[in-house]
Image (spheres, grey):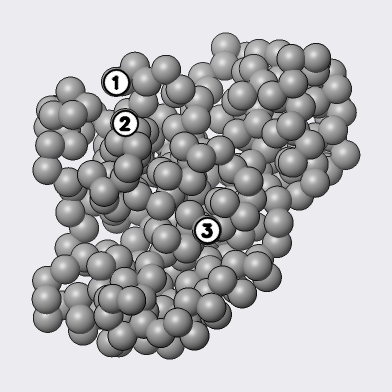
Amino acid sequence: MNGTGTPEKLQQLVQTIRDLPALPEVVVRVMRMTEDPRSDAQSIAKVIATDQAMAARVLKLANSAFYGLPRRVSTLSEAVVILGFRTIKNLAIAASTFELLNREIAGYWLQRGELWRHSLACAIGAQLIAHKVRLPVVEEAFVAGLLHDIGKVAINLFVREQFDQIMEHALQNRIPFVEAEQEVLGFNHAMAGGLIAEKWNLPPALVSVIKYHHRPSSAPDKDLMISVVHLADILSITMGIGIGGDGLYYVLEEDTLAMLGMEQADIDELCEQVVDQMAQAANLQEQPEVALR
């Protein structure tokens, strides 16, 4: 194992991930139903409606700026019809992880809500980039961006206990915080996030994005979505949205822009769009109202 991390710490990490809540049964059912060609919008809406808090947040997300609907939708079945099964599945996943992402992550100096803000900015950025580069799975980009840092929830305690050592290692060697995590702990938040995604039985492509979002070039599958989220993450950090104690030496991988067919002017435009949509999304952190069926 690299660095000073021990097998015991790795075992503790695995146990921590086991202790994290599983995806709610409602989300598991929705994931299954959206892959079944026999499912219909009404039946999927009824399943989501059994969890009122989740249903309300799904509606809030559906009506947010990310989807640019021509009119407000007030019922879940309407949202399913307009947005489609795959997008509704992604919204259900996003809604179910809100509480995890919205908590304080003290190990990274992130106050309550800051990880959610950073994750949301990355989600918005990823969706905008995916649309710009015409990825065939644009609707997957939002959730990929939203969940990219989920591993911070799992290794928060480990980082808090050895934060000074990790920070000193990063500063002395001028390496990104995530690399210092790996060398000091023996694992990092991207790896932990991949383990969580696997526990939740998320699609392999999404697991890969979470696991390799800091180093797309090291991913075995070279999925362009990983570079999309990598760039969106860097944009969010650059704009200072939800940045914590780990905001050191974040590096955009060489050739990322060229690979995506983008230039600096595109980045400036994207930053403006992210800021605008973040302002419109401010109410997503409020306690959701009861959803209409």
Pair 2/1: label in front: 2
Image quarter of residue 178: bottom left
Task: Estimate the x, y position of residue 152 in percent, counting from the top left.
Answer: 46, 65
Q: Residue at x 74, y 15 (%)?
A: 37
Three-letter amino acid code at the position of disc 2: Leu
Residue 26 position within the rendered picture, expressed as x and y whole percent measured from the top left? 80, 41
Residue type beneath disc 3: Leu
Q: Quadrant of residue 63?
A: top right
Q: Residue at image x 37%, y 86%?
A: 162
Q: Quadrant of the C terminus?
A: top right
Residue holding disc 3: 195
Q: Which of 219 and 40 lies nearest the eye of the viewer?
A: 219
Q: Residues within 10 Å of mark 3 (few under 14, many from 20)?
A: many
Which of the pair 105/191 is nearer the observer? 191
Task: Name the residue beneath numbered marker 1.
Answer: 133
At 13% from the left and 29% from the top, the residue drawn is 258
Name the secondary structure under disc 3.
helix
246 above or below 261?
below
Q: Quadrant of the N terminus?
A: bottom left
- What residue does disc 2 label? 224
Evaluate whether residue 230 shows in this view: no
